[in-house]
Amino acid sequence: MSSEWEEIQRPTVARIIWATMIAALLVSAPDLPKRAFFWWPDWAAMTLFFWIINRPQSVGPFAAFCMGLGVDLLTNSLAGSHSLAYVLSAFMLARSQSRISSLNVGGQSLAALMALL
């Protein structure tokens, strides 16, 4: 019975994951003044890290590459610069996902911060 429920739920979860990633890309896109840009968080990376920590079987390096390429295209930055950073960060988080998911919210936030640096 539970396997039927998981099969029904799987496409919905995938839609939610991709919808949040697209929303994060759109929020990352506005052209901000330099003073505001420093304080504007990297929504695409934070959304990607959230899904890597919580659903590692659904989000991986390919999703990180796509998100990075999307950020590169939307912000007119060098193609591949965000992609490389996101893929390396995703790999680090995916490798230590079991340890990170057992931490509290503060510890997970510190892990995501270290991945961003």
Image: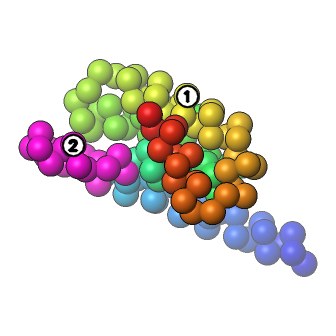
Q: Is residue 25 visible?
A: no
Please tell me which residue lies in front, 64 or 115.
Answer: 115
Q: Is residue 80 magenta?
A: no
Mark 1 neighbour density, 10 Å: few (under 14) some (14–19) many (20 or more): some
- Please identify the residue farthest to the bottom as the structure is shown: 1
Seen in the image, is 62 located left or right of residue 44? right
The quadrant of the rendering that contains the N terminus is bottom right
Query: Disc 2 residue type?
Result: Phe
Query: Disc 1 residue type?
Result: Leu
Please tell me which residue lies in front, 90 or 106.
Answer: 106
Q: Which residue is mark 2?
A: 38
- Quadrant in the rendering for residue 103: bottom right
Q: Which residues are magenta?
A: 27-43
Q: Is residue 38 visible?
A: yes
- Please identify the residue farthest to the right as the structure is shown: 1
Name the spot of residue 45 as percent of width and height, x first.
44, 44
Rendered residue at 48%/34% (across/down) = 86
Residue 51's disc number: none
Query: Does residue 48 sit above or below 9 in this rendering?
Result: above
Seen in the image, is 78 located left or right of residue 93? left
Q: Is residue 42 magenta?
A: yes
The quadrant of the rendering that contains the C terminus is top left
Name the spot of residue 22 as percent of width and height, x first.
40, 53
Name the spot of residue 65 as percent of width and height, x first.
50, 32
Identify the coloring: rainbow
Mark nearest the camera among 1 and 2 is 2
Name the N-terminal-most of marks 1 and 2.
2
- Quadrant in the rendering for residue 83: top left
* Label 2: which secondary element: helix
* Label 1: which secondary element: helix
Q: Which residue is mark 1?
A: 88
Rendered residue at 29%/21% (across/down) = 78
